Amino acid sequence: MSEADRASCPYPAGAAETVHQLDADFTQNPFPELERLLEAGPVHRVRLPNGVERWLITRYDEVMAALADPRLSNELGRGLQQVLPPEPLPPRWQVTLRTSKLLGRAMANLDPPDHDRLRKLVVRAFSAKRIEGMRPRIQEITDELFDALDGRAEFDLVEAVSNQLPITVICELLGVSAADADLFRTAASVLGGMQADDEAARRTIEALDAFDTYVRGLVVARRAAPGPDLFSELTKVSADGQSLTDDELVSMAGLLLFGGYETSAQLISSAVLSLLREPEQLALVRADPALLPDVVDEVMRHEGPVNPGLNRYALEDIEIGGVTIPQGSYVVLGVATANRDPRHWPDPDRFDVTRAATAKQLGFGYGLHYCIGARLAQLEVEITLGTALRRYPKLRLAVPADQLSWRAGSVRGVRELPLRVD
Ligand code: HEM
């Protein structure tokens, strides 16, 4: 940002009294606005496209510090009662309450010690060795999805592959049959989306109720007849006598589904899109497929699904970058801005698969709550991308990149990704 730009900048540093509106243009392309906020200061007040106001932390160092700060709680439900409007609750608020009930006992929404107890019970299932062991099956599912497209010169990657692979993997991990996967898919997509109107909010509640009932049935079935799946393992009492309550099991299933489906699906599409809109980078990867893991890290940094960031609740007054965030505030830790902070990344807007230290990107979080599914997500993207490049030497976008429509909500990604392969 030049001095002239800085002088005319509408966001003076530390101007916490100003609320910056992030509107529909922001959904389509958040980066110009995020860059302005990043340059103007480390802390701002923003109104997100869905209308809610939040504090936003922008810069890499401050976001890292905030991710490790125990005064910023993951228990977002703590502040809910104070902000609820009077009865009767509008449908969108009913969704917030229903979601909070469904996911309230999930580790991502808990602080220590509850968080640590739950994480310990599930983290083993996501060991690097176990995830690597899933490689042949993930490759097989991917091949089947692409086989089904044989003979087609054009297809939508989102519908044909991105939305299919992660849900199939999570359902197999949890021991949910293919026939029931649709119920999971519906619950996950409504949870990740925005409730545009009352009708959408009602449909969301219905989908969450159906998911809740289904998982409680699964708990009963797996306790009676355990299988080799992760969910059967979780329903058992562990060696040190710890066990999960039914509510915790429902929250755990919801978290694995919500945390692992929409995010991975969007990352698959964003990875393919990122390469197809940068022919030089695409050529590098075609020439050296060993670059694929670096591609995934760079996509996470440059165009990761978590945008603008991760939610926290301030347990006390907290001073960040000279601004005091009052106790009881909701704060967004700007992972997307941190990942493009020029203080940390040279030429941050450039997508560059040869960039050093991209593993330090914050798209999977950091510290206590670091994503337990990160390796699984990376593997899914590596396999999908590798398979698509091998199968289709002429792979390209079927529409110009600037005509793609991006979905609203907390998980960023394109609605459709039309590709041509002939
Ligand atoms: C591209 C795909 C993914 C992205 C971008 C992503 C992102 C994240 C982030 C940013 C966090 C930290 C949340 C916080 O600090 O509040 C997180 C936590 C978590 N993720 Fe992922 N995730 C992805 C895939 C997955 C997958 C595939 C699974 C499992 C099937 C998963 C399960 C979890 C769980 C259980 C947590 C909570 C960890 C804790 O609270 O200790 N994620 N994820």
Image (cartoon, rainbow, N blue to C red):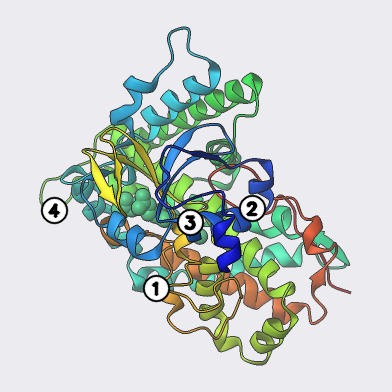
**Residue drawn at x 82%, y 67% as measured from the top left:** 150
Disc 1 and disc 2: Cα gap in Å?
Answer: 27 Å
Q: What amino acid type is highlighted by mark number 4?
A: Ala
Q: Which of pointers 3 and 4 lies earlier in the amino acid sequence? A: 3
Q: What amino acid type is highlighted by mark number 1?
A: Lys
Q: Nearer the viewer, residue 385 or 397?
A: 397
Q: Is mark 2 within 8 Å of ligand 1?
A: no
Q: Which of pointers 2 and 3 lies earlier in the amino acid sequence? A: 3
Dividing the image into four equal quarters, which quarter contains ligand 1?
Answer: bottom left
Q: What amino acid type is highlighted by mark number 3?
A: Ala
Residue under pointer 3:
40
Disc 4: CA contacts within 10 A as few (<14), some (14-19) or many (>=20): few
Residue under pointer 2:
163
Give x and y (percent) for residue 411: 55, 49
Q: Which of pointers 1 and 3 lies earlier in the amino acid sequence? A: 3
Q: Which of pointers 4 and 1 lies earlier in the amino acid sequence? A: 4
Give x and y (percent) for residue 44: 43, 46
Q: Is residue 368 above or below residue 410?
A: below
Q: Nearer the viewer, mark 3 or mark 4?
A: 3
Q: Nearer the viewer, mark 4 or mark 1?
A: 1
